[in-house]
Image (cartoon, rainbow, N blue to C red):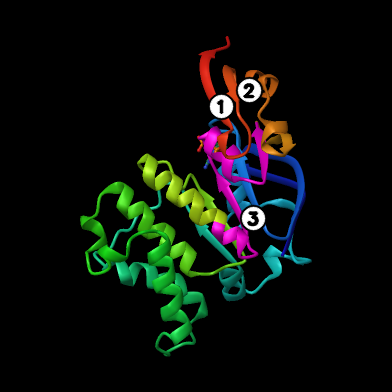
Amino acid sequence: MELRVENLRASLGGARVLRRLSFDARGPSFIGLVGPNGAGKTTLIRAVANLIPFEGEISLDGAPVDSVEPRARAKKIAYLAQGAESHWPLSVERVVALGRLPHLEPFRAASPADEVAIERAMELADVTRFRDRDVLTLSGGERARVLLARALAVEAELLLVDEPVASLDPYHQLGVMEVLRAYVDQGRMVIAVLHDLSLAARYCDRLILLDEGIIRADGGPAEVLTAETLRSVYRVEALIGGEGRGFHVQPVKRVE
Ligand SMILES: Nc1ncnc2c1ncn2[C@@H]1O[C@H](COP(=O)(O)OP(=O)(O)OP(=O)(O)O)[C@@H](O)[C@H]1O
């Protein structure tokens, strides 16, 4: 899978949110999209999912995303929105099964491959024990994992997730990062919007740091999360240490 973003621009409500943004990503890759509030992270992944109008080019394996037939696109790209909610009183299993919709032939029941994907996704997101529960009766963090399972069940080559760990306890934050890592290690691409810089650095192959609609840094976690970028982009002094899975960033003071 190859993703190319070339000269991407997008405006929302008359305001320019993304300004001439370009990057390429290839092969199995776990990309963390980081940056301060309002930087344009959600807008960028919504553009990649072809959910908002944009100028410039976004292509997947050479095909512009806006030219791909919607059902084919829904199989190739899964998107989990920030704070996504479930509004209907469906069982957990039914909600996760919705992730298979792009794969279903009209008026056909789920195939064995669909069943396997649904079971696997529930297992990965640690929600199998809730399978018969009404999703509306779950806690916020449990529901967030069900919605992640729905996105995993798509088995898309590109998974876009917006703040997937925001409402989770530490155990499940690590669990979700491991699940996303494993998804990439199966040969797919994940782009995750993350505010927890330590988690981002420890699990992602690459970080793209956005600020005011432009890419301010792009590279390995230690290259991107320097004292200088944390000061100039996030406006914080931070303690940075460790490497690999031990890498950590601890913001300690605001810079005015
Ligand atoms: N419909 C809209 N009309 C006007 N401005 C908008 C609209 N939607 C988003 N914006 C603005 O676009 C900018 C980028 O928003 P976006 O949601 O992409 O940021 P973000 O980096 O994901 O932020 P956060 O970390 O706070 O979720 C923000 O300043 C936001 O206020």
- Quadrant containing ligand 1 reads top right
- Amino acid type, mark 1: Val
Residue 48's disc is 3
Task: Evaluate whether residue 65 shows in this view.
Answer: yes
Q: Quadrant of the C terminus?
A: top right
Residues drawn in magenta = 182-211
Q: Quadrant of the N terminus?
A: bottom right
Name the residue: 46% across, 74% down: 117
Residues at marks 1 and 2 touching, judged by CB atoms closer than 8 Å: yes
- For label 1, the crowd category at 10 Å Cα-Cα, with few meaning under 14, some 14 to 19 and many 20 or more, is many
Q: Is residue 195 left or right of residue 168?
A: right
Q: Residue furthest top?
A: 256
Q: Which residue is mark 1?
A: 249
Q: Earlier in the sequence, mark 3 or mark 1?
A: 3
Q: Which residue is mark 2?
A: 230
Q: Is residue 170 left or right of residue 247?
A: left
Residue 138 position in % (x across, y down): 24, 54
Q: CA distance from mark 3 to mark 1?
A: 28 Å
Identify the element where label 3 is drawn: helix
